[in-house]
Image (cartoon, grey):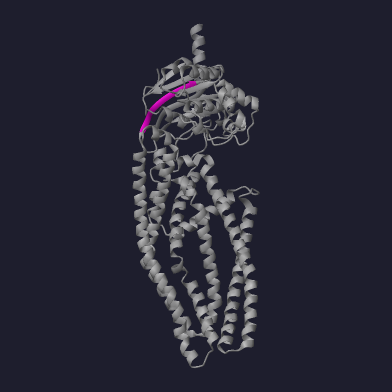
Amino acid sequence: MEKGATAARQRKGRGARARRASSRSRRGRIVDDHLGSTSGRNAKSSDEKEKTGKPIRAIFLELCQWLREESEFSSAGTQNSGPEARLAWRSWAAVLGIFLIVNTCMNLWWSFVIRGFTTALQQKNETAFYHQLWVVMAVIFTWVPLDAIKQYAAGNLSLRLRRQFVSKLLSQYFTNNRFFYLAIDNAGLRLLEVEDWVLQLQTIATTVAQRLLDVCAFSSLLYFLSYRLFVSLLVYCFLGTIISAWVFAPKISSLTEKSTERKSSLSSQICRAYEFREPIAFFSGGAFELHATNAIFEAFLEIRARVLRWSIGLDAFQSVFNYATVVIPYLIVAPAYFSGTVDYGVVSQSSMAFYKVKMALGVLVNNFSTLASVGATTRRLHQLVAEMRSLRKAGYCPGRLTHEDDEDDDEDDDDDDTVLRTTGLALQTPSGESVCKDLNLKVKESERILIQGRSGCGKSSILRCCAGLWRPSAGSVDTSFSTREAFFFPQQVYLPNAKLRDVLSYPDHLPSFSDSDLVDALCKVGLEQLVSRTRGCGGLDAAHPWSQTLSRGEQQRLGWARLLLRLDQYKVVFLDEATSAQDASSERRLYSELISRTSLTIVSVGHKESLREFHTKVVSLPLQSS
């Protein structure tokens, strides 16, 4: 009878396991379907793709397309996006366009005013001279406020465009941990380049629009005054543009892009040295860091020296190109003036019209350095945008694990208590190095698992996979808990530069804990002195650079306080070397708080042998279990 009952229970267990296997395909399963492993996805970064030499025009159009797509994805009614934001910057763009037209009309009027003024002076007509002088003063006093309004509109448009573009980039950068997966150099620092890029781009767009209006207005005037002068100007500007585009453009654009990259690398090196200043100081590594920084700085200066040499050649060409315009109109119009066909005012008006049209047609020559800088920054921003775009389209960085309830679970027997199961799990680092192979691990509810092994064998990588940060190169991970029911404690505790209450409440935007709860959590982890230490400077509202103020052990305990505050929310806690900086008594105190919760499942990674007493099972890597 007992054998029959045992066989029946085994058949029932097999049936339950089959139902669970079918449900796991819809419940918290992490499989590397179409994306490949982390190393496979990162094998070809956007930097490599950009080396194909895509035209800058195509890159700029792709950036504009991306901005339109992001505006469509944005929710309406928010401050930095949606129809209201688009209407705001488009309204200021329309106002700016109107005043650009007004500015061209004022320039055209000014040419006729100066023509009459100089003619009266040349003819020694005192009455006409003083009349024209009053007209000149009237034009000036009318022009100044109109120009101020134009500048105000341009400034507001710049602010709104920068807000629009930067908010989109920041949103995409921080959404779904995309900053973790970006495979391009200095991705964060590229965000800082947006400010100058938008301002330079708007300046170029405004200049081009103004020059086009000037061409339309003054070309007709110039053609009317002198056909020969108009044709000479077209030929002159065409030759100047061709020389600039063929001789200077390729070299200066390439060098400017390299210079921007070197400058970004230099900023990254200095920031890194500041971030790790304590270990560098312990090792007396200032000389090494100085050598490394100087090497990057010298490479940057070498590029800048080459840019300088080519820029001097360009500046010399631009000077000749611009100074020649002072002489050319007089040479062409002078014969007509000497023959008495035209008066002197026509000569000055022809010179002004020639200058305006030359400035319009020579916009490439006169703004070449700015165009080169914008082109270099555009390529770097396009690399960042293309990388984030591919992550979103591929469905990469999905957050963490997902969980869906299954009706078949109600039929499972009492043995259905598996919280985490890995089947043939294999992991690779982003560089392609294998750190874990064919791992089969099963964690049941309320178990306390300790994962140990030599350094580099993949202990922390397993936690990254469980958190959804890494994808398996083979195998799968099945879970029975949702994202909100799991807490991940990384090796390095992140403490934002904020109020103490906000540090404890991180990552919640709005603290939801009372002062007594926060103080109680600090006392549980042995940080009573932190409460008394900060009482005189704001208490829980004290704001300090906590990663610099607190020791590594205190930082870890602050992370534990953050965990204990939310302990009732979690079913599973993953700890990665969470007590590496604690003494034996502090370690026992912290783990005792977790063990007191008998229903809590704990998965720890650690080297300390003392951790074994707090766990019910030890898994040694590369062995599957022990």
Image quarter of residue 95: bottom right
Quadrant of the drawing holding the C terminus? top left
342 in the magenta segment? no
- Magenta portion: prevailing SS class: strand
Magenta-colored span: 434-443
Could you tell me if residue 428 is visible in this image?
Answer: no
Q: Tell me where residue 488 appears, x and y as whole percent.
A: 51, 29
Residue 547 vertical position relative to residue 587 in the rendered view, above or below: below
Image quarter of residue 413: top right
Residue 19 vertical position relative to residue 147 in the rendered view, above or below: above
Query: Looking at the image, how many numbered discs can be counted on the residues?
Result: 0
Q: Tell me where residue 507 appears, x and y as whole percent.
A: 57, 34
Residue 223 vertical position relative to residue 485 in the rendered view, above or below: below
Q: Tell me where residue 355 appears, x and y as whole percent.
A: 49, 76
Residue at horizontal 54%, vertical 80%? 220
Work out whether residue 536 or residue 231 is closer to the camera in this orientation and state it: 536
Furthest residue toward top: 1
Work out whether residue 415 or residue 17 is closer to the camera in this orientation and state it: 415
Work out whether residue 183 or residue 147 is closer to the camera in this orientation and state it: 147
With 428 as the anchor, is 216 left or right in this view?
Answer: right
Q: Tell me where residue 492 appears, x and y as whole percent.
A: 47, 31
437 in the magenta segment? yes
Residue at horizontal 40%, vertical 53%? 50
Work out whether residue 530 or residue 229 is closer to the camera in this orientation and state it: 530
Could you tell me if residue 359 is visible in this image?
Answer: yes
With 585 as the anchor, is 159 left or right in this view?
Answer: right
